[in-house]
Image (cartoon, rainbow, N blue to C red):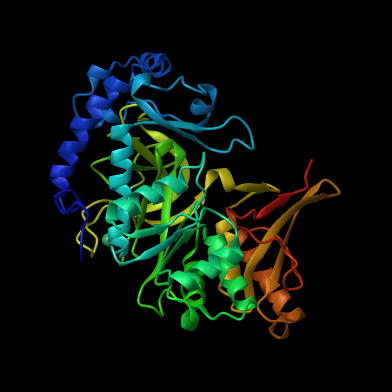
Amino acid sequence: MPFFEEKWETMSQDQLREIQFEKFKTQAHRVCNSPFIKNRFAEKGLEPGDIKNWEDIETVPFMSKSDLRDNYPRGLVSGDWEDVVRVHMTSGTTGVPTPMMYSKNDLDVWTACMARNFTAGGLKKSDIIQQSHGYGLFTGGFGFHYGMEAVGAKIIPTGAGGTERQLRLMKEWGTTVFTGTPSYAVYMAEFAAEKGIDPVKDLKLRLGFHGGEPCSDELRERINDRLGYKAHGGGMRRCYGLTEMGGPISMDCEYENGIHLWADHYLVEVLDPETMKPAGKDQPGELVVSNLSFEVMPLLRYRTGDHVVASFDKCECGRTHPRITTFLGRLDDMILVGGTNIFPCQVEYILLNHHELSENWQIIVGERKGLHTMKIEIEPTTWTDVDEHFIEALEKELHQQLAKKCEVEIKPIGSLPRFEGKAVRVIDHRT
Ligand SMILES: [Zn+2]
C-alpha cells in the first residue's frame, strides 16, 4: 500500500493527539485576530490563552454557516490579508456566498491532504485522468487538480459538462480515472450506453473519484458496475468536504471502509446535536471540525450540519486517522414534510435497493388542503418489471422507513432531468 506522506499518515494516535492539542492552542490565538471571533470568545468569558487542557477545547464557541455569511466577505480573516493568494466561495445561488481564503501555505496543506487521499484511493503516476469537477469559484476542480498533480498522474482538465466530448476523449486517450459528481457519473454511464459504448469493453476506466454530493453504498455499486471501475480492477471512491473546511479534503481509501479525514490538519468531533457533547463510540452525531493548519481563515469547532457516524480506529490500510463510516445526511438538504424530517439520501437508499428502479428520481413536495404531500417520481430500468403491485409495495416500504406517506409515480425513461454537476433531488411547490 503506497502512501503520500507515510510518516504522517501512519503516526501513532497518541502522537497525533499531542500535535492536535498544540496546534489547536496556536489556532485559538490566531482566530481571535478576527474581532468577530474574539468577541465570541469574550461572550463566553474566554481568552485564547485559557486553553490549557483537552477539556478546555469543549468550551470554545462553535462557528456555523450563518457566521460566514454574516461576515461576508472578509470579516473572518484572522491571518494577514497580504498573504492571500486565492479566494473560493460557494455559488451563493440561495443567498450570500460562503467564502474561503488561502495563503500559499494553506494551498500546500490542501494539496497534501488531497494527494494523500488520491494515493490512498489507488491513484498512480501512470493514470490518465479526466477531471470534470468544475474549475471556478467552487473548490472542487482546483482541489482535485492540484492533489492529483502532486501525485504525478496525467490530468486532462476538461471541467464539467460537454458529455459527448468527454466520452470521445475517454476513448481516444484511454482515460483510466474519471472525476465529477456521482450524478454526473450516472449520466455518463447512461450517455455511453445510448451511444452503443460498453464501458467495460470499450473504455479503460478503473477509478472514479466522485464528490460534491452524498452517495449511498448502493449508488456507488451501480456506478462501479456501469462505468467498469471494478471490472478494471479499481473502484469508485467517495469524496467529502466543504468550502468552510477548505474544500474537498477527505476520501475513501482502497478498502472502502470509511472516508479518511487527516487528524494532523483537522480536529474531528462527532457531537450529539441535542447536548453538543461527544456522541460516544459508533454513535451518530453532527460532524464538528477544527482547521488546525490554515493561516488565513481557519475556523475552530465549525458545525458542518452533516450527520455522520465516525470511527477513530486504525484502518486496514494502515492509516491511523479518523474516518466517516456512515453519512446519514446533510442538514442543509433535509426537508421537513408535515412534521417529518426527510433526508434525500435516505430515500435514495430505499429506491436503489430495487434493481427495477433507475438512478433518475426526484421528490416533489406540495400542499393539498393545507396538508404537506410528498411524491417520488422515478424512472424504471426497464418497463416490464414495474407493475401496480410493485408500486404499492414500494409506497408501503417508503411509508414504513420514512414514517411519512409517500406516493410513487413511474415516469417514462428519459423524461426526468439529468445532471452534469450536483443533482437537484427536491422540487418544493409549497408556498
Ligand atoms: Zn483506509
Seen in the picture, residue 261 relative to 48 is either above or below; the reply is below
Q: Position of residue 297 (x, y in %)?
A: 38, 27
Residue 266 visible, this orientation: no
Q: Position of residue 145 (x, y in %)?
A: 39, 50
- Image location (x, y in percent) of residue 372: 76, 50
Return the residue nearer the eye: 293 or 336.
293
- Where, by quadrant of the figure, is residue 69 drawn? top right
Q: Is residue 105 left or right of residue 402?
A: left
**Is the C terminus in the top left, top right, bottom left or bottom right quadrant?**
top right
Q: In this rendering, does residue 338 appear at all?
A: yes
Q: Residue shown at 37%/13% (left/top)? A: 42
- Residue positioned 34% across, 14% down in the render: 45
Question: 87 left or right of 265?
Answer: right
- The quarter in which the N terminus is drawn is bottom left
Residue at the far right: name it.
Answer: 369
Image: 92 above or below 216:
above
Q: Residue at x 28, y 59 (%)?
A: 119
The quarter holding residue 400 reads: bottom right
- Does 236 sit above or below residue 271? below
Q: Nearer the viewer, residue 13 or 186?
A: 186
Q: Number of callouts in the render?
A: 0
Of 149 and 144, the residue lying toward us: 149
Q: In which quadrant of this rendering is ligand 1 seen?
A: bottom left
The residue most toward the front is 172
The residue lying at 46 percent from left, 54 percent from top is 157
Location of residue 379 in the rendering, given as x and y in whole percent from the top left corner? 70, 71
Query: Residue 3's quadrant in the figure?
Result: bottom left
